[in-house]
Image (cartoon, grey):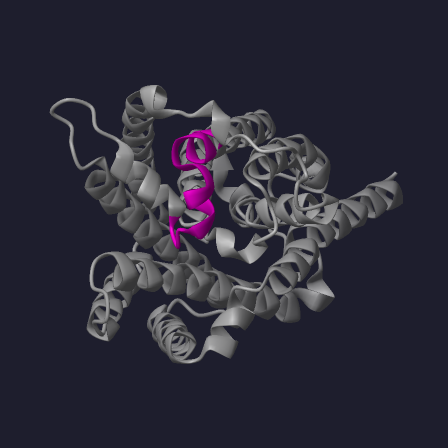
């Protein structure tokens, strides 16, 4: 990453907020069929309270190191670690584009082939990813404003449609279903990895910003989950994309078809997330293989992502593997918890040797 290329902490955290909102709004409840309505609210609150503990290694890393790349902290394992992180980022890109493809093919073009649309989308993403980081950061700020306004309007319009008799007993499906939901909510919050990778090029009070981001993200997730369950009731559990169904209920005077507006914001958010992921892949590969040419890495990444998405569309077993909770939980533990923990330990050891 070009050291002269900097973004502010608020730009980074707004990018992370857009990315996390996308994960929430494209959530598919069928992964936990035994959970009751109130279990989703309870799990979102529990995950909110649990996040500061889970992300403590990241907070400690921010406090200990603001200048060194995570890869330079492990010089002997730098190249394997870089490749491993790139593979994870590719997985995240495949997951994002697959979910976008599923959303478009079921909501907009049911029973239509969306291959051409995915190719055009990926070509646009590859081009944007070849640009600098600052335009992506500025776009993230703008999209966050539109997303926040859309959700605010939907919230206001749904207030008189909430039904509190939809509430079911807590843990009606057993404690295991709630635990599974808490794990699902937590491991979907992979955005701290973006923070770890972009930490050396971020200006401002990152530690304070990250703590605020955790609190705000957890609160927003709890509120929107409550809105979903109290507006749709049991039908929310049988929707492929329940938050889209919730947006269809929104109607505030002249502002009709809020689902169309929010859908547009979702698609742009997915595009932005893909741009950020491919930008990071390009940057890591350039540093690892010591070249200024981004084209080969962009092309290879694009081909891998497109191939994986098309295969997942045709193969239910492969799609199930991509979306599986155990796989995502394993990757989350390795790269969002263990990696920053190892980095903090490495920094502390170096500090003791200097003393």
Does residue 288 appear anywhere in the picture? Answer: no
Quarter of the rendering containing residue 330: bottom right
Where is residue 285 shown, x and y percent of the image?
49, 67
192 sits left or right of 170 in the view:
left
Query: What kind of secondary structure does the magenta stretch mostly adopt?
Result: helix
Q: Nearer the viewer, residue 226 or 322?
A: 226
User: Relative to 298, is 260 above or below?
Assistant: above
- Residue 244 is one of the magenta-drawn residues: no
Which residue is depicted at the point 52% across and 64% down?
323
304 sits left or right of 157 in the view:
right
User: Relative to 87, is 207 above or below?
Assistant: above
Q: Quadrant of the C terminus?
A: top right
Which residue is depicted at the point 44% across and 32% down?
224
Most distant residue in the left direction: 254
241 sits left or right of 143 in the view:
right
Where is residue 261 shown, x and y percent of the image?
21, 39
Q: Which of 42 and 339 is in front in this view?
A: 42
Please provide the residue range marked out in magenta. Answer: 226-241
Where is residue 186 shown, x and y percent of the image?
61, 45
Which residue is depicted at the point 58% across and 63% down?
85
């Amino acid at each position: 990453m070009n050291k002269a290329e900097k973004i502010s902490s608020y730009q980074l955290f707004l990018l992370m907020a857009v990315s996390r909102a996308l994960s929430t709004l494209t959530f598919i409840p069928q992964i936990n069929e035994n959970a009751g309505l109130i279990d989703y609210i309870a799990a979102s609150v529990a995950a909110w309270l649990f996040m500061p503990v889970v992300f403590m290694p990241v907070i400690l890393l921010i406090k200990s190191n603001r200048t060194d790349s995570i890869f330079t902290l492990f010089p002997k394992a730098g190249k394997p670690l870089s490749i491993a992180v790139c593979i994870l980022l590719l997985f995240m890109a495949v997951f994002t584009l697959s979910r976008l493809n599923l959303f478009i093919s079921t909501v907009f073009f049911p029973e239509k082939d969306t291959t051409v649309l995915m190719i055009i989308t990926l070509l646009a993403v590859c081009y944007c990813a070849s640009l600098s980081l600052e335009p992506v950061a500025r776009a993230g700020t703008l999209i966050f404003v539109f997303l926040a306004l859309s959700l605010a309007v939907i919230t206001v319009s749904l207030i008189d449609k909430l039904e509190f008799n939809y509430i079911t007993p807590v843990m009606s499906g057993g404690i295991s279903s709630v635990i599974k939901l808490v794990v699902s909510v937590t491991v979907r919050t992979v955005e701290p990895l973006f923070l770890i990778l972009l930490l050396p090029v971020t200006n401002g009070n990152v530690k304070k910003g990250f703590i605020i981001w955790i609190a705000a993200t957890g609160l927003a997730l709890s509120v929107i989950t409550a809105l979903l369950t109290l507006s749709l009731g049991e039908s929310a559990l049988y929707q492929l994309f329940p938050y889209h169904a919730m947006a269809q209920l929104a109607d505030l005077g002249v502002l009709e078809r809020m689902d169309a507006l929010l859908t547009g914001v979702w698609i742009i958010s997915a595009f932005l997330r893909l741009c950020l992921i491919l930008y990071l892949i390009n940057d890591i590969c350039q540093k690892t293989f010591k070249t200024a040419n981004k084209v080969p890495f962009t092309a290879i990444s694009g081909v891998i992502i497109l191939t994986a998405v098309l295969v997942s569309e045709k193969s239910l077993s492969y799609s199930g593997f991509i979306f599986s909770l155990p796989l995502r939980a394993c990757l989350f533990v390795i790269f969002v918890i263990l990696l920053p923990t190892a980095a903090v330990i490495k920094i502390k050891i170096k500090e003791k040797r200097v003393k």
